[in-house]
Amino acid sequence: MKKKILYILMFLPLCVQAQIGEHRNDFAVGFNGGYVFNEIDFVPTVSQDYHGGITGGLSLRYVCEKYFNTICSVQAEVNFSQIGWKEDVKNKDNGPVINPVTGQAEEYKRTLNYLQIPFFAHLAWGREQKGFNFFVQAGSQVGFLLSESTKKNFDMEHINLEDRVNKIVAQDTMKVEKRFDYGIALGGGLEFSHKKVGHFQLEARYYYGLGNIYGDSKRDYFSRSNHQSIIVKLTYLFDLVRTKRD
């Protein structure tokens, strides 16, 4: 089922291009930057807060046509993203768990640095060259783990499991086993365009990973360990090729 959804979203941009409407041949490049809130959907469950990190990179867009009032295009990015998980270490009274050795509240955070490549079908309604439009985009995304790092303030040999509500800690010592990630993404936002300046996009996006970072067989500890992200970003694009209009 996961693969079927991914295939549909991969070929959705091709379906958009196949429509019959007013021809466009607009190609723009630029850059994007923003912030990503990520968590890992672990089964068994691991209590978490959102892990915050930066994301940014190269953006490209090709507008192929205007179908009635819908501006149809494909948009892709090549991004560096800091994602991962941050554990919510609480006791039964919803307070912090104090480590018996350090005397501090136990904290754990894993940062995973990815190269991510999303590819979208991009549909917009409104002004093309001067003014605002509203857009939605959906598609697939692949990612490659570049590196990982851990920030914690306790020794695993002296961890306070007795006071923890959630005692799942196997992930704290496990390095990522699957470096390739893939999934689906959906976003929407506003774009301001000016013929001489370019295009500015403000977008909110959700990503759901279809792959796991750990093995998911019956012999593995976790049956699920996929990424879920909320991304807020600003994108700037400038036209390299633009359709001539009267």
Image (tube, rainbow, N blue to C red):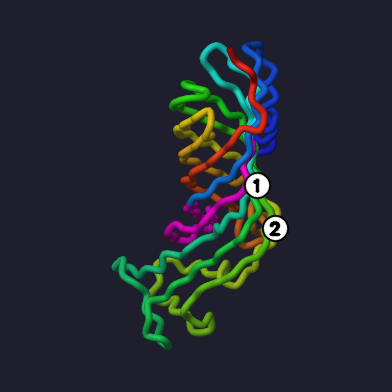
Q: Secondary structure at mark 1?
A: strand
Q: Does residue 217 appear in this view?
A: no
Quarter of the C terminus within the rendering: top right
Q: Position of residue 62 (x, y in %)?
A: 65, 29
Residue 122: image quadrant is: top right
Residue reaching furthest to the left: 93
Look at 65% across and 59% down and name the residue there: 214
Q: Position of residue 219 (x, y in %)?
A: 69, 61
Look at 46% across and 40% down and name the residue there: 204
Tell me the amino acid under the disc marked 2: Lys
- Identify residue for label 1: 78
Q: Does residue 186 appear in this view?
A: yes
Q: Position of residue 138 (x, y in %)?
A: 57, 33
Whether the magenta-drawn stretch holds residue 46 is answered as yes
Tell us which disc is closer to us: 1 or 2.
Answer: 1
**189 left or right of 212?**
left
**241 left or right of 162?**
right
The mark found on residue 242 in the picture is none
Q: Secondary structure at mark 2?
A: loop
Magenta-drawn segment: 35-60
Q: How packed is label 1: few (under 14 Cα within 10 Å), some, or many (20 or more)?
A: some
- Identify residue for label 2: 178
